[in-house]
Image (cartoon, rainbow, N blue to C red):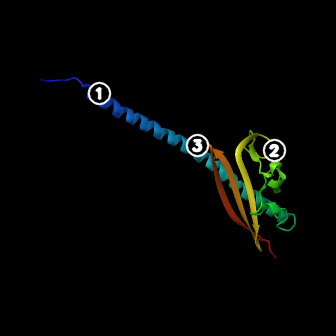
Amino acid sequence: MNNKGLTLIELVIAVFVISVGVVGSFSVLQKVIISTSISSTRLVASYLAQEGIEIVRNIRDTNWVEGDFWLDDLNAGDCSVAGPGCEADYNFQRLEACSSQPGGQCRYLRIENGGFYNYGVGRETTYKRKIFIVNGTDFIKITIQVDWEESGRPHTISVQENLYNWYAP
């Protein structure tokens, strides 16, 4: 007997195999989309952390150029690791204690239409940047921590750098 048609069992197996393949590929696609989203926000957070280092470096360099003590405006007690941290942006190049904010917390950064992050104007983002400073003898250890929440989970990225009194007599 020469049977050229599909049996019901062969048809059920074929549909099952195709279904497993389609569901598997959708699952992989969903994970790729989530991973891409987290990667882009992590990249923004790392740039915001590096910007925090640059802001502190600019404060130190401005002190040197103006003939002030290199640690002026960098000795805020709330900026120590034991404190709540400080915040700063390029609009106001000074450290401001997070404890001076309502609720004693660091504020969310805002983004302007031009793409600049600050605390004053623009759309509120999910990023909070905290600046911590530990004083040494001729250096300060800076830690910048950027916190944000995505997909219902908190994320944190930290950057550390030592800044030296390179103009020490």
Residue situated in front as seen by the camera: 64 or 100: 100
Q: Earlier in the sequence, mark 1 or mark 3?
A: 1
Where in the figure is residue 132, as x and y percent of width and height?
Answer: 74, 61
Residue at the bottom extreme of this rendering = 169
Residue assigned mark 1: 11
Residue 37: mark in rendering: 3
For disc 2, the neighbor class at 10 Å (few under 14, some 14 to 19, many from 20) is some
Q: Quadrant of the C terminus?
A: bottom right
Where in the figure is residue 49, as x and y percent of width and height?
Answer: 69, 55
Is label 1 in contact with label 3 (beta carbons under 8 Å)?
no
Q: Earlier in the sequence, mark 2 or mark 3?
A: 3
Residue 120: mark in rendering: 2
Instruction: Report the amino acid beneath label 2.
Output: Gly
Let me know if residue 158 appears in the view.
yes
Splitting the image into 4 quarters, where does residue 24 fall? top left
Q: Earlier in the sequence, mark 2 or mark 1?
A: 1
Which mark lies nearer to you, 1 or 3?
A: 1
